Image: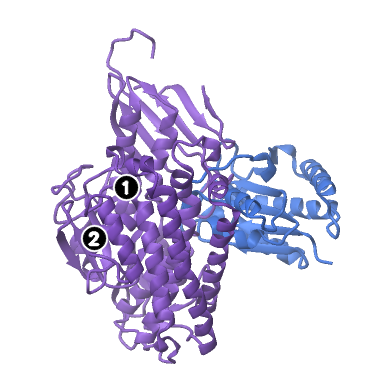
Chain colours: A purple, B blue
Amino acid sequence: MPEGETKKVERRITIDPITRLEGHGKIEIFLNERGNVDRAFFQVPELRGFEKFAQGRPAEDMPQITSRICGVCPTAHHMASTKALDALYRVEPPPAAKKIRELFYSCFVAEDHALHVYFLGGPDFIVGPKAPAAERNVLGVIAKVGVEVGKKVIGMRRKLREIMAAIGGKPVHPVLGLPGGVAKRISAAEQEKIKQIAKEAVDFGKFTLETFQKLVLENGEYVDMIRSDAFTHRTYYMGMVDQANKVNFYDGSVRVVTPAGEEWGKFAPAKYLDYIAEHVEPWSYMKFAYLKPLGWNGFTEGEKSGVYCVAPLARLNAAEGMASPLAQEAYQQYVARLGGKPVHHTLANHWARVIELLYAAERLEELSRDPEITSPEIRTLPTESPHEGIGVVEAPRGTLIHHYQTDDKGLIQKANLIVATQNNAARMAMSVEKAAKGLISDGNVSEGILNMVEMAFRAYDPCHGCATHALPGSMPLLVRIHDSSGNVQSALQRDWDGKIRRS
Amino acid sequence: MPSPIRILCLGNELLADDAFGLVAAEELRRRFPQMDVVFTTDSGFHLLDNLLEAKFICVIDCIQTDRVPPGTLYVLRSSDMKSTYGPSPHYVGLLETLYLARELLLNVPKDVIILAVEAADCLTLGGEMHHEVKSTVALVVDLVAEIVHNSKPTDAHDDDFAEGLRQAIATVSARWGSERLVVV
């Protein structure tokens, strides 16, 4: 805009990750007449056509179909779908089948969390948010923690996937879950191997916690950043809990706590429609989940807002603790250090993830010792006609809901998925807006906005269309500044090679 | 002696044009049964398992740049992409995984060639492949065949692999028209 221009302008800034398949997330920032941020929107396009695609397919195919939706967490979709089939056919799996499923799922969570903690959250915390851009990557992480630690992470991952391949047929798209049970029992020899790997996983979890404490928690600057207002929102929190209100990834009730930390609701997964509704905005494909009894009151915080969030931070807030001793100890330290519950700091997701990694490993170890996992009683055959089924698990990135309705032959008539990104969408938009407000003033768009805004939504790990893999592998960003007529006035771009240029 | 070149086809058979990798893999297997062809819907660090223990890798995938018509084939090399970030698992891809593996001294190729077709739609579940994208399957199969042929697959070295790639691009450009390829 020419200098000295006085007429009212509204400028639109678009931050567009111009990667390929899953890179369609886009941030639009609207400036007011003084050049400060009025509103910021975070757009995530969803996969289209799921309901139509599912229609007419046999329900028992859904664990295989839905596990192909996402190349990052196929196991979560497989398990939520399998549980939806239990409900659809009104069949209760035998105890051994439930334990095998949970054991398998614990491997998945431990593996996923380990990779995230070291190689993905690492650039922010292990390397440091203020480190040069060129170092804020997996190479920077390896440089900081050492090659041996990196190899340890990869080695642990390989062993956990060996267990998953042995139990699930294959590690990536498992063929384990059937309505009423699992497809394969665990042999005594397999149990021995699982026991050994599970012990190593617990040691690895302890090591990870120690590493995190040393590199992150002993650094006051990092802790200050976690607690900073820029990354804080007082919202509701949702997560699945067991009967003692402890975190559970595989089964239980869904519990919701208020921004003050009090229990607001606790419901069986089948009742989710009484508690969760979805709001649509004209500027986004994304449906914004909110707490139905509270209603949609916009992108706002506090008790009166229906905005809530899921994922590690939310799970630790929604629960009253962890169901295993070492994770519980870590949980108590976490709560004490961050000033009590609920923890409202978005960046604490990384710390919560370390605690959950330890819990998943301990739960894996506990189940590996259970004599019942080698029982041949792994299936209850369905005898009822199918009608409707809802399955819920805690995916690494938050509560995942599968809901199917079928005809009496078991062919899907209607299917609905609520994925973690939808649960988090409203709060994520609020985080991006807050980061943008802190970084843009009087029309000056700092280059730092690229990293800070990215950090604001990275903590939630949004699934952008949840397709497959990114090429060229990095995440270029583009900020476009438009005037009210839609003309591009200037652009700030981070390219594939990491260089930032203005035009 | 098996070919030292692995053809790693990526994609998702449920997502319209993203099925390109699978369709190309099926065609390659049909025409060249001895070729080391892998198809996977894996993503992020899960790709690591497919990168290990191969001397050279040629990836077949989709790309969306909105700069060229759907069906145009990009030829990219991982060595041309020097920098990488550490965003979220949903933004981790081939390059992060490759860099990580190298840093951990795992046995992965020095260079990866990426043959990426410009896609029109990778977000519609059960969607049809765009006809121009579908027509590029034959082109990419031809290009892979030329790369393998020109690189003396039984004993390819870094230099003759690079030279083989240049020859293959020249041959296929002449055959299909240079406008069908974008060599980066």
Residue at 41% x, 46% y: name it.
A458
Tell which of A346 and A197 is nearer to you: A197
Amino acid beneath label 2: Ala
Q: Is residue B113 visible?
A: yes
Q: Is residue A276 left or right of residue B122?
A: left
Of all chains, the one bearing label 2 is A
Q: Is residue A45 visible?
A: no
Find residue A444 and report its horizontal and vertical position in percent.
38, 21
Residue at 24% x, 63% y: name it.
A319
Tell which of B152 and B182 is nearer to you: B152
Disc on the earlier residue, 1 or 2: 2
Tell which of A282 and B166 is nearer to you: B166
Of all chains, the one bearing label 1 is A
Tell which of B124 and A322 is nearer to you: A322
From the image, tell me which residue sits under label 1: A346
- Disc 1: CA contacts within 10 A as few (<14), some (14-19) or many (>=20): many
> Compared with residue A308, is residue B64 higher up or lower down, i.e. above or below?
above
Find residue A69 and report its horizontal and vertical position in percent.
46, 61
Q: Marks 1 and 2, how far apart in space?
A: 15 Å
Task: Determine the image quadrant of residue A57.
Answer: bottom left
Indicate which disc residue B14 carries.
Answer: none
Amino acid beneath label 1: Thr
Task: Determine the image quadrant of residue A368.
Answer: bottom left
Q: Is residue B136 left or right of residue A55?
A: right
Find residue A182 and report its horizontal and vertical position in percent.
43, 82
From the image, tell me which residue sits under label 2: A318
Name the quadrant of the N terminus of chain A: top left
Q: Is residue A344 left or right of residue B181?
A: left
- Disc 2: CA contacts within 10 A as few (<14), some (14-19) or many (>=20): many
